[in-house]
Amino acid sequence: MNLDPRLLDVIVCPACRGSLAVDDAAAELVCDSCGRAYPVRDDIPVLLVDEARTPS
């Protein structure tokens, strides 16, 4: 994934407003608070709650 570090400083989880961490192996942004994982497609984060993988 090739995400701009400045973008990562600004975006938050749309569900709970928690901070997001990069998971390069899974190509996802994972919320530190609620655990939802948002996919990154073509280097664009898909920050839709309906598209997120919920923690098991």
Image (cartoon, helix red, strand yellow):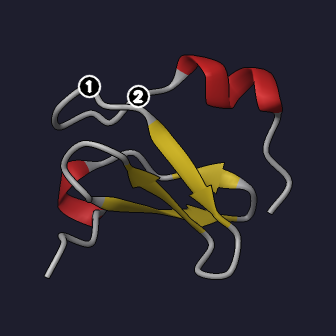
Q: Quadrant of residue 33?
A: top left
Disc 2 target residue = 12
Disc 1 target residue = 17
Q: Give me the residue at 70% from left, 70% from top.
A: 24
Q: Is residue 51 placed above or below 6 in the rendered structure?
A: below
Q: Secondary structure at mark 2?
A: loop
Q: Nearer the viewer, residue 46 or 15?
A: 15
Q: Amino acid at mark 2?
A: Val
Label 1 or label 2, whichever comes before in sequence order = 2
Q: Give me the residue at 86% from left, 54% from top.
A: 2
Q: Give me the residue at 68% from left, 81% from top.
A: 25
Q: Residues within 10 Å of mark 2 (few under 14, many from 20)?
A: some
From the viewer's perspective, tell me whether residue 52 is left or right of residue 9.
left
Residue 3's mark?
none
Q: Are marks 1 and 2 in contact (CB under 8 Å)?
A: yes
Q: Residues within 10 Å of mark 1 (few under 14, many from 20)?
A: few
- Measuring from the top left, give residue 49's x and y in whole percent: 21, 51
- Measuring from the top left, give residue 30's x and y in whole percent: 43, 56
